[in-house]
Image (cartoon, rainbow, N blue to C red):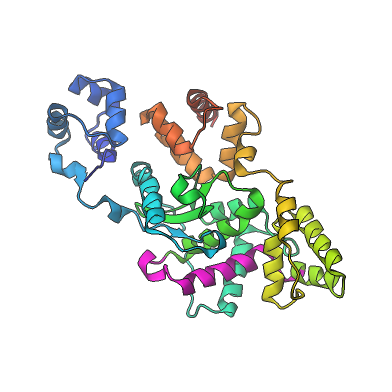
Amino acid sequence: MSFDGAKIRLKAKEAGLSLTALADRLQVSRQAVNTWIDGRVPRGKHLVELCSILGLKPGDFFEPNAKAAISAPLHRTIMKKKVTPGMTEASTEMAGEYLNIFRQAPDFAMVPVARVQERNTGSARKLAEYLRKMSKANDDRPMDYAGAFKLLDALNVYVVLRPFPQEIVKQSYAFYSRIADQRVVFVNIDTNVLDLIYFLLHETVHAIRDEDALAINTEAEETFCDKVAMFTQFPDYYVANVATAIKGGEPSHIVNLLKNYSATNGHSVYGLYYRLKEDGLFPDGLSVGGAAANLNKRFPSLRDVLYKDPDPRYFVSMLGELSPHFMRLVKANLPDATVRKVGEWLGLDTTIDTKTVIEEMDAQMRKM
């Protein structure tokens, strides 16, 4: 069973107690109360006293089915590999690490949800058009990775940026999960930014579809989300221009043109290749694998973007730009969170000290 430490803060507030005052009454440190809020179970005596002060029973803190608060994570795997039970278990476990913080997340006034009658190409195009309008994307330009993050922000979706465990990292770049009724997309920071765009958009479609995971976790739904993501990333006008440029060209010239378009506009060669194939605009028999691999070497991973500068101000600024909703949630929970827990939430590595990051976030909040 899972210990729901978030109830401590809620019940203390209802009782008119600060967490410091609660700690004093229990004769423990404020740090101890913080660890309980993070999910560590208080010792028997403290649990009994805590319940007495807050008017609860010990069983009120324990959920027999904590996983019910977390939807089965939805993935578009790399190369459409099969989602294994180990991968689902690891993803669900990782999502569970954020259960307490999302229990305390405010509800959004507007939560866009898109329903479709039929999962066909026409519906995919209409949904893609809506998503591009939401992101305020330029009609003649493909969406880059920054645009994909802006779209998630516009849809009020929380984005968690962190390294993935090995059970997931070789299979998926991002996944969508529903946690305590909040829509969340987890993103692996060790992903090349060119490869990331399509997977971000795919999980964005899951988030806006927002249907029961068991009902939509099917190949038909995955294929539909693939199409929406592809049409969202590459508008028709851009695709038509590329198709005109490569028409009748020599194979090597076509591949070089695709690589140049991709480099100029910040997207993967494969993404453009598949988009052209979708409309029957790419010659059969041409391989773009070498060009795609060479181009990726010229672009950074998301980790490189976040840790480009060792100054914690830069790191906090980049997180605020790419994941504004989640950063606001973390900042709101700073007073009652342990340093270790903040480091876990932000997926911090050892190159930046968590305490300095917390100090920077505190400084930003004081300026607001």
For this view, does 236 lie left or right of residue 173? right
Residue 338 is situated, as x and y percent measured from the top left of the image, at: 37, 28
Residue 337 is situated, as x and y percent measured from the top left of the image, at: 37, 31
- Above or below, 147 relative to 36: below
Residue at image location 74% in from the left, 57% down from the top: 290
| Residue 317 among magenta residues | no
Residue 325 is situated, as x and y percent measured from the top left of the image, at: 50, 45
- In this orientation, which residue lies closer to the viewer: 189 or 168? 168
The residue range painted magenta reads 211-237
The answer to whether residue 115 is visible is no
For this view, does 5 lie left or right of residue 295? left
Residue 69 is situated, as x and y percent measured from the top left of the image, at: 31, 53
- Above or below, 116 relative to 328: below
For this view, does 302 lie left or right of residue 365? right
Q: How many marks?
A: 0
Residue at image location 61% in from the left, 34% down from the top: 307
For this view, does 89 lie left or right of residue 129? left
Q: Main secondary structure of the magenta part?
A: helix
Residue at image location 14% in from the left, 39% down from the top: 58
Quarter of image, res 210: bottom left
